[in-house]
Amino acid sequence: MLKHRQKRWWRQPRIRGWLIQGLVLFIVGLAIVYFATNLVQNLQRLNLPFGFDFLWSKSGPSIGETLVEYSPTDNIAWAFGVALLNTLRVMILGIVFATLIGILVGVARLSDNWLVRKLATVYVETLRNFPLLLQLLFWYLAVFFKLPGFENRVQLPGPIFLSKNGVVFPWLQANAATMTWVVMVGLGSAIALLLWRYLIRQRIERGTTTPSWLWPLLLWTGVVGLAAVFTQDVPFVMTRPQVINDLVVEGGLQFTSEFSALLLGLTLYSAAFIAEIVRAGITSVSKGQWEAAQALGLKPTLMMRFVVFPQALRVIVPPLTSQYLNLAKNSSLAVAVGYPDIYYVASASLEETGRSVELVLLLMAIYLTISLIISTLMNLYNRSIQLVER
Amino acid sequence: MTLINSKSRPKSPPTSALTWLRRNLFSTWYNSLLTLVSLWIVYLGGRGLLVWMFSQAQWTVLQANLRLFLVGRFPIDQIWRVWLVALIIVAVASFTAGIMQPHRRLAVGAGIVTACGLGIISLVKGQLSDVIWVLAMGGITILNLRLGPWSKARLPRSLLTRGLPILWFLTFFAVLWLLSGGLGLSSIETNIWQGLLLTVLTAVISIALSFPIGVLLALGRRSSLPVIRTLSVFYIEVVRGLPLIGILFIAGVMLPLILPSQVQLDSVLRAICGLTLFSAAYLAENVRGGLQSVPQGQTEAAKALGLNPVLVLGLVVLPQALRSVIPAIVGQFIGLFKDTSLLSIIGLVELTGISRSILAQPRFIGRHGEVYLFIGLLYWLFCYLMSMGSRRLERQLEGK
């Protein structure tokens, strides 16, 4: 007769699991208590209080470049707000330009043209293999810093002025009619887009042969025409930079050399990685898909639009998300070129106030929030393009 | 039934240079346009670079500061320790290469590198001892490339496969001992580690330390126990959401505060802590990918053999998981090596930091292009060596 052997109690998986978890929790808790006690003792020894009220003291660090009004007599919280705007400006412009250049280079790596292919390869391999910090320092100190001063500026057609102080170029300026124009064009585009998608679906389902772009285009033109009739004005005014005397320039959009170097370095570096992602995405679409699309008699544009691109996008978007996150995090290297972003302001405030724990927490909270927002948006987009299986 | 016999397939016509040009560069009008534009870009870029290199750049900044770039202000009477470290690493590496893949090209390469080293020493007017060290390194490499196959033929295989990791392990500690001192050597504070030496040391130490933490975190994230899983996920996601410079800032500011006041960590050790904590989170994600690639059947088979959970992991799952993610792990280590340049922002004098202080010398103001090109090439060289080594290792492990 077999004797039923009961496992001893500490060898039962369930109980052992609880024991291990309890032990881990105990150790982690012990470590936290130990560090916290040290922290409290050290803060007492250094005579540092804890609390976030210092953020409202009116002694913000000096910030060289701001999008909104700011002076060092404002409080530190506002300094962080200004710095956040600066950070977001670099992140958003960087993501847009890096995506555009990345797609261009990625497609160039698959070009039929041997020379274009090789040039794109050299671009990707060079930029990916040098540290980003070094590239930023190079753009700032070896390129922008070597430019002549503003009195001997380089003038490109436009006019675009290049000098040690940065770049100035013509830009659009809003006028009284801008708001109406923006609303009308947005409305018209939205309606036209919906109509276009509806017509495309009709075409796929019923095989109608009417061109799907004609009615949306007419509708859009009508709405935009209405805007012109309403406002009787142009949507924007183009302002060209004008040199008042040899020191002051008015009009146009001005980028400081710090911002330009940071944006250029970040964009070119991230674009090299995005190019590889785009290339991998396009090559992942199997040859059979191209051939099947051709066999159906699709035109090359439709083939790209309906067959290749949707499938490539599914492969591209997840790694693209992590590239965007990297770009956002790498924007903190702004401090190396002296562009006042969040990290710059945090370390400057540390020197002024010495409130290290609070500043560390603030820094963590801001970056984690930005990372979370980017990944949430990209995950939503990713879900919308994924294959819906039965 | 095959319809097309591969032998009867018509041979592609021989291509002449002209047809190659037409096919690859001028097939359509827009391709021709693209070619012309690209040629113009290549011409402008190439001419600019050559003009700068040969008429504007002044390379004396490198010649005068080579020692600073490489070892910083390491005491001159102790410089033999750095040379000895280099010699030991070269010896162990060449012995490993000799066992894994003895190749005639490697010996030729070693000869060329030695000759280059001698050339550089003569350029910077080095001493006789430098020449001897370089010659010794070249000699020992070529010797070891012969010794490797010889010992592979005579010694039992198990001794070699067990012995090599142990040898590398011992090398790591020997190097640390030689560079930091103690036990009969005069001690050198980590503050004195500078230049390329500091870059390599921080990278290697952080990589070595982050490896066990990363593997544990990956196992924790895959664990069925909710507490362990939650803690691992929390750590990994928080660290991955922060920029490295932020983590270095946190390590620099918070570590002195959360440790008892008697413990004094200098800035190099704090930076190594920051790099390790950062790298462990990314490593954990890579290892997790490897763990997911091991089929469930392997675990079940190992359990059926009566192995306990620790042995199942150590003998069956982890070896397969780690082997499949070698490229990802090496890619991450290359990234970490490049990221050590960020240490210059928090005030360490590694390769990027020392270039800043060299460029601040009045003699060399404005020589940014030359210096950044040089240290960029140094970074590139190390990254290239790492990726080459990983490819070798991968091939070796596949061949088993």
Image (cartoon, coloured by chain):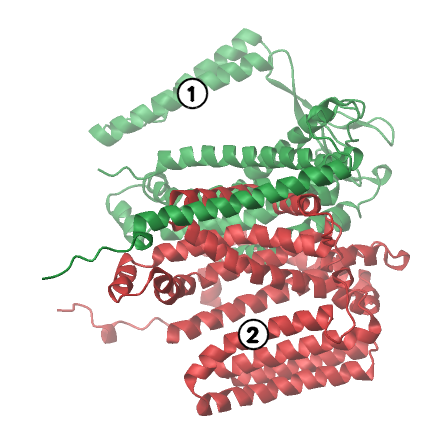
Residue identifier under label 1: A190
Q: Residue furthest left?
A: A1
Residue lying at 63% horizontally and 51% vertically, measured from the top left: B274
Q: Residue B389 at x, y = what percent?
A: 53, 71
Q: Residue A313 at x, y = what percent?
A: 39, 42
| Subunit that carries the residue with mark 2 | B
Q: Please tell me in which quadrant of the rendered image residue B56 appears.
A: bottom right
Q: Where residue B338 is drawn, which disc sits there?
A: none
Indicate the colour of chain A.
green
Residue lying at 80% horizontally and 45% vertically, measured from the top left: A147
> Relative to the observer, which residue lies in front, A120 or B195?
B195
Residue identifier under label 2: B168
Secondary structure of the residue carrying tag 2 is: helix
Secondary structure of the residue carrying tag 1 is: helix
Indicate the colour of chain B.
red
Question: Left of A27 or right of it: where is A263?
Answer: right
